Image (cartoon, rainbow, N blue to C red):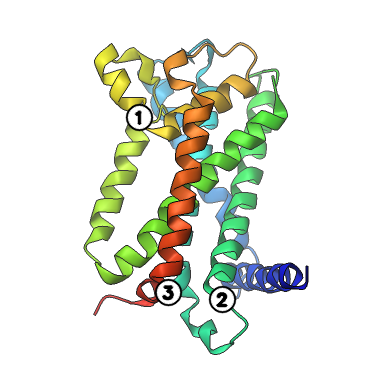
Amino acid sequence: MEALANFAKYTNALILREIRIRMGSNPLSLLWVVTEPILNVMIFISIKLVIGITAVNNIDNVLFVVSGIVPFFAFQYAMVKVLYAARSNASLLSFPKIKTLHGIMARLILEYGIMLIVFVLLLSIAYWAGHTFHIKDLLMVMYNYTLCVLFGAGIGLIFSPIIGRFHFMDTFLTLYRRILFFTSGVFFAVDSVPLEIQKIIALNPLVHTLALLRSNLFENYVGNEIFQNDFYATGCIALTLFFGLIMIRKYENWAYETPS
């Protein structure tokens, strides 16, 4: 219990440190952390409205975009923050009680909270603007949102030591993120592609997580069952996180290396 209490204490201290770093000399800088993803969502909504798409999978287009983009950003930001957590907190190694996982958890918790605030805020704005909806299962929505963040954390843990040692892998990870964006049903419904391609896309656990999130968030959501395998998504994400923890423990020193 004492070890757990100490872990929570050090993690909390690093969360406060992360907040101070983001604020800088201007407290309003923290507001930009929330505003930036909101502006990105508004851009994507505008694009789809210009195209003329008003509804997807039996839900309003605005709700479809918000429920896809924000959880995906939560996944992406969690991945990037965990990926570079070790190098960003390298100066703290001089304190023997501070461990790599403290910095990782601090960044992960902060990103989780920020993007959750953005998610609630955007859904509230959409509702007040006339895009009404009824939540089917709030607990499962939180579960699916958490899976998105944990998947990002798992990928970040796996690649943190790899990119530390083999810096060129950063390019591969950037490409991987872009592929996931277009194959996870973030912006468009993936069930409109041919069946053979759908079977390939269904290998991506994130597409299941987002579809299940929408299914639990909106009562009238109609999605393809091929992309709603909860057991598969949870299993893949759990394995990713487990493998990531092994990687960061076994090759922790690699994560602190920087490009020469």
Between discs 1 and 2, the one toward the N terminus = 2
> Could you tell me which quadrant the C terminus lies in?
bottom left
Residue behind mark 1: 203
Between 178 and 164, the one nearer to me in the picture: 164
Q: Is residue 248 visible?
A: yes
Residue at 59%, 87% in the rendered image:
95
Q: Are marks 1 and 2 in contact (CB under 8 Å)?
A: no
Residue 69: image tag = none
Q: Are marks 3 and 1 in contact (CB under 8 Å)?
A: no
User: Residue 112: horizontal and vertical position, in percent?
Assistant: 60, 50
Residue at 66%, 39% in the rendered image:
121
Residue 59 located left or right of residue 27: left
What crowding class fits label 2: few (fewer than 14 Cα within 10 Å), some (14-19), or many (20 or more)? some
Question: To which quarter of the image does residue 20 belong?
Answer: bottom right
- For badge 1, the amino acid type reads Leu
Between 152 and 242, the one nearer to me in the picture: 242
Residue at 59%, 46% in the rendered image:
115
What crowding class fits label 3: few (fewer than 14 Cα within 10 Å), some (14-19), or many (20 or more)? some
